[in-house]
Amino acid sequence: MNQVERTRRFAQLAYSAALGEIVREFDEKRHALRVRLAICGRVVTNEHAKLDGEQITAAIKAQLNTLLDGYELNGVPVDDEMAATIASEVGRSLEASITRPAEILPGIPGMAEVMKCVHVYQVRRHVGISPAWIRNEIDRRRSIKTPQTEPFTLYQVDNDNPQVNVDRADNSVTAVIRANGQLFADLRHKIEACLREGSERTVILEKLSGLEQAQSPQLFAQSYSDFISAAARHILLLIPFNPSLTEMVHKVLA
């Protein structure tokens, strides 16, 4: 499997997990809306369209972000041609999501076709992104420079005859992980704060600890894969950390 294939596979898995979370969230919102409208005895199509528009926005952003994250994590540069391809692909998904057949809302007999047209118009108004936004976001992500890590001083003490080496370059796995201690702490805090207690959270935290304790590039690569797989259903939680994770992976596996 080449780098582009790995990128696409990562993006598909990550997007599938993210989409599942988005669908569940908006299904709960629609249920609450139906209950509220049933109590009031009203049919408010604009509120349904608003939820559809917000869900489409969240789903398209997740599709774009997971795809770009996949390219970054696999070290595949996004050139002009690739950027145009991604923009076209995600733009088609956006338009298809907006114009797909809508659920026919009850309460207005004989007006199904008119309702569909009105619904599509209202959904489009509530979608917060456009093809231009997609291309701008791709270009923005391409222009982001990988932040330079702050230099750190490494002290090494060997046996009973201490030898202190100051400012000694060290690209070992242990040194890289030590330099990213705050990243691991922030990840652990985010997971504990956002996920309910249970076996799934426990497994994700165990995989994170395994990654933090890796002592060789091979073990680090396997531990990183295990952590991402364990957290796949909650990939949206990791998106803010992806730039730092990507930089750390590149340092270890370079």
Image (cartoon, rainbow, N blue to C red):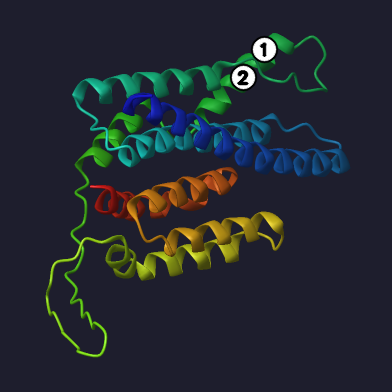
Disc 2 designates what residue? 118
Q: What residue type is labelled 2?
A: Val
Disc 1 designates what residue? 114
Q: In which quarter of the view is residue 78 placed?
A: top left
Residue at the front extreme, as displayed:
160
> Which residue corresponds to the image point at 31% horizontal and 40% vertical from the top-left?
72
Q: In this view, does 51 lie above or below 82?
A: below
Query: In this orientation, which residue lies closer to the viewer: 117 or 95?
Result: 95
SS label for mark 2:
helix
> Where does the image place residue 31, in percent across and percent down from the top left?
78, 40
Q: In which quarter of the view is residue 132 placed?
A: top left
Q: What residue type is labelled 1?
A: Val
> Where does the image place residue 25, in percent across and percent down from the top left?
66, 43
> Which residue corresponds to the image point at 77% horizontal and 44% vertical from the top-left?
32
Task: Describe residue 92's horizontal placement relative to residue 207 as left or right.
Answer: left
Query: In this orientation, which residue lies closer to the viewer: 207 or 112?
Result: 207
